[in-house]
Amino acid sequence: MLSQEAVPVEYQKVPRPPDPAAMLSPAERQDLRFRCMMVRQVVAELLAFAGYEGRAGRDRRRSVQHIRQISMYVSHVVLQIPMQHVAVAFGADRTTVSHACRIVEERRENRAYDDFVGAAERLTASFFLTPGGHLHG
């Protein structure tokens, strides 16, 4: 027969993964944020150039969300910045960046959306890459 006595269980603390922001120097964080904000500006200007005027209420919030998602995606894919560092630059969590990348990939099924994201990728590459394909800086 089994004993009914309670057996004490000892739990060990699981070490937390290092904070990605703590792994970067202040200069690296500033450079990273600058690069990602430049990508965000490229995406916002392209959207304005395309004539999208989502200025009021819900449309404004939605356009800001799309700009941010596309910017995170382009920063990760074109500039090859790890998702954890993109998250630091945008003041978000890594899972938010992962979700943004997944959403953008899914929406690329739409030809017009794919063309827009492709233009953002090409412009970003032209700003940050030399003709030989090496990152500036």
Image (cartoon, rainbow, N blue to C red):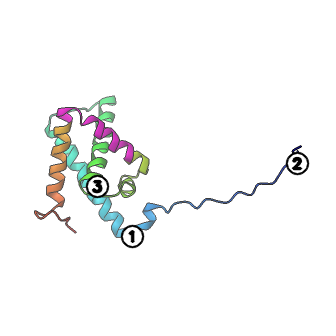
**Mark 2 / mark 1, whichever is N-terminal:** 2
Q: Alpha-carbon neighbours of circle 1 within 10 Å: few (<14), some, or many (≥20)?
A: few
Q: Nearer the viewer, mark 2 or mark 3?
A: 2
Q: Alpha-carbon neighbours of circle 2 within 10 Å: few (<14), some, or many (≥20)?
A: few
**Mark 2 / mark 3, whichever is N-terminal:** 2
Which image quadrant: the C terminus?
bottom left
Q: Position of residue 95 (x, y in %)?
A: 43, 47
Kindly identify the amino acid type of the residue bearing the numbered disc 3.
Answer: Cys
Label 1 belongs to which residue?
25
Q: CA distance from mark 2 to mark 3?
A: 58 Å
Relative to 64, 87 lies left or right: right
Relative to 72, 45 lies left or right: left
The secondary element bearing badge 2 is classed as loop
Label 2 belongs to which residue?
5
Q: Quadrant of residue 134?
A: bottom left
Kindly identify the amino acid type of the residue bearing the numbered disc 1.
Answer: Ser
Residue depicted at 55% across the width and 60% down the height: 16
The segment highlighted magenta reads: 98-113
Q: Position of residue 49 (x, y in %)?
A: 14, 39
Label 3 belongs to which residue?
36
Relative to 56, 11 lies left or right: right
